[in-house]
Image (cartoon, helix red, strand yellow):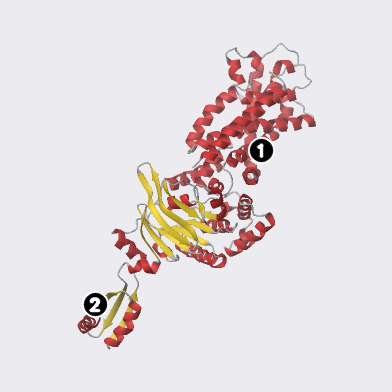
Amino acid sequence: MRYAIEAERLTKRFRDLAAVDGVSFTVSESEIFGFLGPNGAGKTTTIKILATLLRPSSGRATVNGYDVVRQAASVRRSIGMVFQDSSLDERLTAEENLLFHAVLYRVPQREALKRAGELLELVGLSERRRDLVRTFSGGMRRRLEVARGLLHRPAVLFLDEPTLGLDPQTRTHIWDYIRLLHRELGTTVFLTTHYMEEAEVCSRIGIIDYGKIIALDTPAGLKKLVGGDVVAVKAADNRELRDQVRQRFCLEGKEDGEAVYFETPDGRTFIPELVRAVPDVREIYLRQPTLEDVFLKLTGRAIRDKGGDAVEWMRIRHTAWRRRRRG
Amino acid sequence: MQGFLAAVYIIWLRDVKRFLREGTRILAMLGQPVLYLLIMGQGLRATFRVNIAGFDYLEFVYPGVIGMSVLFTAIFSAVSIIWDRQFGFLKEVLVAPVPRAAIAMGKALGGSTTASMQGLILLILAPLAGVSLGPEQVLAIAGLMFVMAFAVASIGTLVAARMETMEGFHLVTNFLTLPMFLLSGAFFPLKTAPAWMQPLMRLDPVYYGVDALRNVIFAGSPLKSFVVGQTLTGDLLVLFCFSLVMTGLGMLAFSRTE
């Protein structure tokens, strides 16, 4: 089986700091693979190494079978990249941005125009294709950037925090588009995020913290680390309920308010058995553990959300400077 | 090679498109040379007296003002490399399957194209300086402006390749442009400069650009031997060699970026 991405003990040191520390993983073709972790965990550094923008200090990685150091040109030809910070030219139109990209990747012009039209349609920007990107909202820019990353039909698409800094509604839209594009084109997607809910899109997730992968599995598999599902039950007599469950399933329930909570590996099969065993159950509901619970369990802390890093500040200054110049 | 040319073309085209969309900026850029021509030119005219019949200081200073304008616009065109690196388009090129050396070439070509387009607008001011130009002269000047702008823009590109911040870029370019401007012979001919200054002027690429412009503007004039330092061929040769070295270094610097 050929892997779309293979990383073996990948390490990147900046002076004393190991931003990426011996990371190994594989991504299969047509998979949506996600790196989940707090800011500064090494997600972007990993993406940059895979996209040949940084050389690893040690370890090796291949993308589409090409070595990211020795066959950088072949890697670049076969990948699409959407950066955390926009890399669009805001003084060009949407279409110009796409067509410039096509020249860089040597897509013939006629084909480029056709694909640009299709992709703009797909991301809902057809009507704005002749407008300057400067007039676009953050969500529109991101959609355009995703479209641009796909224009040359890459085998692997890298998305670095594709929804960072967008409002929740736009975020949902972006994810809908990514899923749609994945379905339509079958592109392998490698993405990073620090939003727990969003990582659910992935077929597999690597949780990364301080440069190390601390868990790697399907979202469901990761949640199993927490100890299974949570089943909350209300019955006519809660003490009777707890006694019966203890006898039949060897499960200790926790009573909290009106309901009794049971942690069980598989809630969906537990519920019918419970109903058969305890006849006077009034309400049951099943809560699945979230990735937030997983991260908390693995690291003992919640994903921290630091705002405003250096680049963020520079962008603010840049905008102010331009405004002064224009004014 | 094809990838290299494609990237050079795109980077150049982008600069030209952006330039043409900034109509107001183009006009605003006209202000500074007009001030130099009118205030510096008229002001110094009275004090700069030469015992040669028919010599007019304004006519002499006009090619210098063109050269100066080309110098400033060409060298600062490289500023966009710094912004692009932080906020955008450069990353798109860095991750594309094209040689990074193309960035240096494309940027130098883009900067020199826009700088010479701006220089062309300055030709409107020729009557103000009492200079009359034929169509062949205009064509020759346009070509010379491009060659000179390319030499200067390749310096800017080389600096920008090494600089991460705006502050750093401005510090270095200001440090370079002021002496380049003052030593260019825009305001006084090399022949009247003190002996110690003359070799320094000969190190300045802008000097050769201004000298080349004077070679064309004063062609056939009796004043030519006074205002011009060397032959047009000599000027062009120096500018070509200089551009070659600078662009080469710039391309090398970009290829090395990790």
Give the distance between the C-alpha atoms of the residues marked 2 and 1, in whole angstroms: 78 Å
Q: Mark 2 points at which residue?
A: A251
Q: Is residue A117 positioned above or below A236 on the image?
A: above
Q: Nearer the viewer, mark 2 or mark 1?
A: 2
Q: What element carries label 2?
A: loop
Q: Say left or right for A270 vs B60.
A: left
Give residue B113's mark.
Answer: 1
What residue is drawn where x is 58% and y is 49%?
A: B97
Residue A209 coordinates in the image, percent (x, y): 35, 55
Is disc 2 surrounded by few (<14), some (14 to 19) or many (20+) residues within 10 Å? Answer: some
Image quarter for residue B135? Answer: top right
- Residue placed most toward the observer, B2 or A112: B2
Q: Is residue B29 visible?
A: yes
Is disc 1 surrounded by few (<14), some (14 to 19) or many (20+) residues within 10 Å? Answer: many
Give residue A219's mark.
Answer: none
Residue B125 coordinates in the image, percent (x, y): 71, 30
Residue B10 coordinates in the image, percent (x, y): 63, 46
Image quarter for residue B43? Answer: top right
Chain for numbered disc 1: B
Amino acid type at circle 2 is Leu
